[in-house]
Amino acid sequence: MIILDGIIFSIQKFGGITTYFNNLASGLSLRMKDQVQIWKYPGTHPDTAQKEDRTLRLIERYRDVDSVPANSILHSSYYRTSGKPGVRNVITVYDFTYEKYGKFPHKWIHGLQKKHAIKKADAIICISESTKMDLLYYFPEIPEERLFVTHLAASDCFFSFGTQSSSRFDEPYVLFVGARGGYKNFKSVVYALSAVPSVKLLFVGGGPITTEEGDLLNKLLSNRFQHMGSISSEQLNKLYNDALCLIYPSQYEGFGIPILEAMAADCPVIAANCSSIPEVANNCAVLLDTPDPEAIANAVKTMMDKDVNDRYVALGRENAKGFTWDKTVEKTIEIYSSL
């Protein structure tokens, strides 16, 4: 029996991890049917064949998983294991953001939990080669044969409408998706677009605009920005299809799903040339060695050339096809079978 520990769905409603585990659980349920069971805690869970409701104990997210049947494989969605003899533990490592950018006490607490899970796991899945290299840097004692890489993908709800909207050039806007703080370089995008007066900035998610962000936006972009807040995947797909480009200047990502979402929806990508991003973009995006305002502004101006824009649309569309959740699920089944 494969037990999928769905603790992540009680921790976050939206995000890359829930996207990954949702698609993984749904795919495994289709292929392995009665061999897979997801353990549910309060939260929104994927629609799978077998589910078991679990009680959410005090600080559940930090506790070992109990009552796992003997001879099962436990795959936790967020750094948990079972100490029961005969249970084989699988974890997925997403990134090392806390280790690189976190602050006490969250960095310390998260680090202890991740270290405990990595030490106990029989198989460790990394979502990119970059994350695997980071893991070996922080945990050089872990045997490499216990490490496996399974790439992620864009969900099926991100796709091309097949016709390019005139607003891409007549009323151009660039898109910024996700968290905006620190290493995400949102401020650099704002400064960059202050030098490209014909282009608007639309940004999605990332929580409310802070006072500091609001002051900067109003000073530099005036009426040329709009915060879309939390929107549906269908709405985001529409924004991708109509955007001049996605700007993704993050200096660190475990994977970077928005890159593939944009590419699947015929949206060219400008991104930072670091961490996992080159691995995901595959030379099908404009990659900036230094994602500072001047470099971003120049890249946006380049994207306003229709021929250049069309070329990156075509490159991105083909690149996105190479990443599928079917591949992720198939590789994961192979990992289970090897235990």
Image (tube, rainbow, N blue to C red):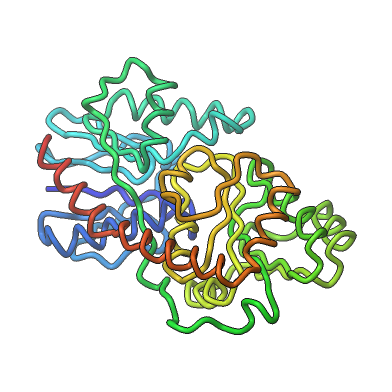
- What residue lies at 49% left-to-right and 63% top-to-bottom? 312
Q: Quadrant of the C terminus?
A: top left
Q: Is residue 8 above or below residue 251?
A: below
Q: Is residue 276 above or below residue 162?
A: above
Side of 101 relative to 292 (left or right) = left
At which x and y percent is residue 86?
12, 31
Question: Most extreme residue toward the top, as rendered?
Answer: 141
Question: Most extreme residue toward the front, as rendered?
Answer: 307
- What residue lies at 66% left-to-right and 44% top-to-bottom? 291
- What residue lies at 65% left-to-right and 77% top-to-bottom? 169
Residue 307, located in which quarter of the rendered image?
bottom right
How many numbered marks appear? 0
Q: Nearer the viewer, residue 274 or 231?
A: 274
Q: Is residue 126 above or below residue 174?
A: above
- What residue lies at 34% left-to-right and 54% top-to-bottom? 21
Q: Nearer the viewer, residue 39 or 216?
A: 216
Q: Nearer the viewer, residue 314 or 48?
A: 314
Q: Nearer the viewer, residue 116 or 65?
A: 116
Question: Most extreme residue toward the right, as rendered?
Answer: 219
Q: Is residue 49 above or below residue 17?
A: below
At which x and y percent is residue 178?
59, 57
At which x and y percent is residue 250?
59, 46
At which x and y percent is residue 84?
19, 30
Side of 272 relative to 50 (left or right) = right
